[in-house]
Amino acid sequence: MSQVLPGVRGFPLGKATKIRCVDPSLAECTVGSLVEPRRFQLRGDRHAVDIRISHVSMGLGHLFGVSHGVALVATSAPISSYQVMVPLRGRLVGNTAAGEVVADPGTALVYSPRDSLDTYWSEDCTSLVLSVPAERLRALARDVYPAADASNIRLRPLMRLADGAGRSFANALGVIAQESIDPESAFRRGLTTQFLEQTLLLSLIAAQGESMEAAQAFPPPPAYIGKALAVIEARCDEDIGMADLVRAAGVSMRTLQYGFLERFGVGPMTYLRQKRLRRVHDALRQASPGSCKIGDMAARWGFFHGSAFANAYRKMFGELPSQTLAACDSAPGRRAVVA
């Protein structure tokens, strides 16, 4: 039984499996026929590919169960819907408008309209993905909060599901995931459909900490976080520490720590380490023909202890650096030397 969504057992929406294949292009066509097109770029052993997608269509949009059997990156052009990705196992890493966000079981990765999807799925990741047309959520917001301007609701990219409204969202999603594949359920017969769907969407809004009465879009980061992010971006490859970020931000260490936790779900130094790991990951994915030593590349971004680096890399991306490089190296005319 899923600890994230009560009652969800095994592969989510398993009775509604729409496709099971080893061809990413076939999966792209299947998903693109239902929601916005996206591209799947494999990042692991191609022999391990086992793409499985289940799907149910609802009044509020679409719900998918997804697993791939291999690490991959899913990308898209700017989307027009809200996308909520709930990992039941494994990890999602999203490059969002607010920065890099890591979602493990117990959290959800959220994209808003006009975002471009750029999501890394670990090889062991199985997720439920909720796609809600923008107007569907906005219409509900206008009904419930008539004084609000609901034309530009931007949701926070990381949502916690352990308590509060996030727990309410997870509970409602779990019930819908079970009821939607049972033809005899009250949900499928339309008796509880509107109630459960409204509960799900209202919990989604509430879990984001949005004030619909004020109808405020998800704001840019506070100035002090922006200053810290600027230092991280400009000096990511330098030996910078918490003191440097505090000095640049002009606030106390405690304020900066809490600000990052609220915004990104991790503290400043963890955010910096994840940024550096992403830089190594990107470099390995784009390795040029010729020699490419992983040890040298890791050191370039501040990782000098091989085993600790490999463990951190695998925890974040679901594969070893050598596997990322091997996937790149498998392209015609590419080769690399692994340190």
Image (cartoon, rainbow, N blue to C red):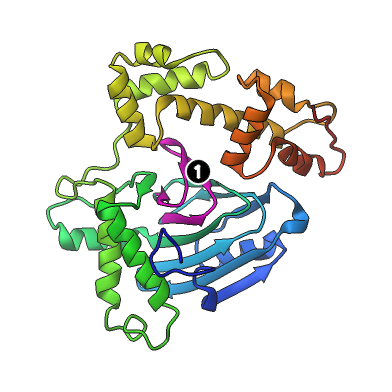
Tell me what residue is drawn at x 26 percent, y 58 percent. 203
Asked if residue 36 is among those painted magenta in the image, a careful observer would answer no
Dividing the picture into quadrants, the one containing residue 269 is top left
Please tell me whether residue 16 is drawn above or below residue 334 in the rendered image. Answer: below
Q: Position of residue 19 (x, y in %)?
A: 62, 72
Bounds of the magenta segment: 83-111
Please identify the residue farthest to the right as the structure is shown: 333
Q: Which residue is outermost to the bottom?
A: 184
- Relative to residue 132, is residue 283 drawn left or right? right
127 left or right, relative to 123: left
Main SS of the magenta part reads strand
Count neighbours of disc 1 (C-alpha within 10 A) and say few if under 14, some if 14 to 19, many if 20 or more.
many
Q: Secondary structure at mark 1?
A: strand
Is 190 situated above or below 316?
below
Q: Say what amino acid the circle numbered 1 marks.
A: Gly
Q: Position of residue 83 (x, y in %)?
A: 43, 55
Res. 194 image quadrant:
bottom left
- The number of callouts visible is 1
- Using residue 4 as the reference point, say whether residue 220 is left or right of it: left
Q: Is residue 246 visible?
A: yes
The residue that disc 1 covers is 94
What residue is shown at x 45% (from left), y 17% (from top)? 231
Q: Is residue 99 magenta?
A: yes
Tell me which residue sits at (56%, 13%) in the image: 238
Q: Is residue 287 left or right of residue 247?
A: right
Which of the pair 329/257 is nearer the observer? 257
